[in-house]
Image (tube, rainbow, N blue to C red):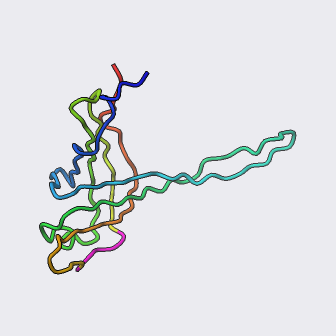
């Protein structure tokens, strides 16, 4: 049976870009999609699949504090995602390799509201640095 106290809340998530903690980021999403090729083989009633290339995409968003993303331009960077919770079985760190923004947000503000910044990006690999393992 699942112990509900072990469920991880995103409250304690952290984003590091090239080793620097981005205290303003409050949301990160990243995933990998694999291209599959269908193969139909004689004598087989099931279609089989050959794995092809992978594509990594993601989005990070948070409050605008500096012009860092504008200054960075379209230069590649690495992201380390750290997901932890004091009641969890541990923490998870995943490094996203060779991230490049899809576009750079130059302006997006409304009088009287906090300015937020969202950056969609692609990446070219990942490493699971620290897995969460149940005791």
Image quadrant of residue 124? bottom left
The residue closer to the viewer here, 76 or 5, is 5
Q: Residue furthest top?
A: 135
Vertically, is 130 above or below 106?
above
Image quadrant of residue 13? top left
The residue that appears at 71% across and 51% down in the rendered structure is 38
The residue closer to the viewer here, 35 or 85, is 85
The residue that appears at 27% across and 52% down in the rendered structure is 79
Q: Which residues are magenta?
A: 102-107
Vertically, is 131 above or below 62?
above
The residue that appears at 21% across and 55% down in the rendered structure is 17
Vertically, is 43 above or below 101?
above
Q: Quadrant of the C terminus?
A: top left
Image location of residue 82, percent across then percent down: 25, 43
Q: Quadrant of the N terminus?
A: top left
Q: Tell me: 42 left or right of 3.
A: right
Magenta stretch: includes residue 104: yes
Image location of residue 39, percent across then percent down: 74, 49
Q: Residue furthest right?
A: 43
Q: Residue furthest left?
A: 66
Image location of residue 7, percent across then percent down: 33, 33
The residue that appears at 19% across and 64% down in the rendered structure is 63
Q: Tell me: 83 left or right of 32.
A: left
Magenta stretch: includes residue 123: no
């Amino acid at each position: 049976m699942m112990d509900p106290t072990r469920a991880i809340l995103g409250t304690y998530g952290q984003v590091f870009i090239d080793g620097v903690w981005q205290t303003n980021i409050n949301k990160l999403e990243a995933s990998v999609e694999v291209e599959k090729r269908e193969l139909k083989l004689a004598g087989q009633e099931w279609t089989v699949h050959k794995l092809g290339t992978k594509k990594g995409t993601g989005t990070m968003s948070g409050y605008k504090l500096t012009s860092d993303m504008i200054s960075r331009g379209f230069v590649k960077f690495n992201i380390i995602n750290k997901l932890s919770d004091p009641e969890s079985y541990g923490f998870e760190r995943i490094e996203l390799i060779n991230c490049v923004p899809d576009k750079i947000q130059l302006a997006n503000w409304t009088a009287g509201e906090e300015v937020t910044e969202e950056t969609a990006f692609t990446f070219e690999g990942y490493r699971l640095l620290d897995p969460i393992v149940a005791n």
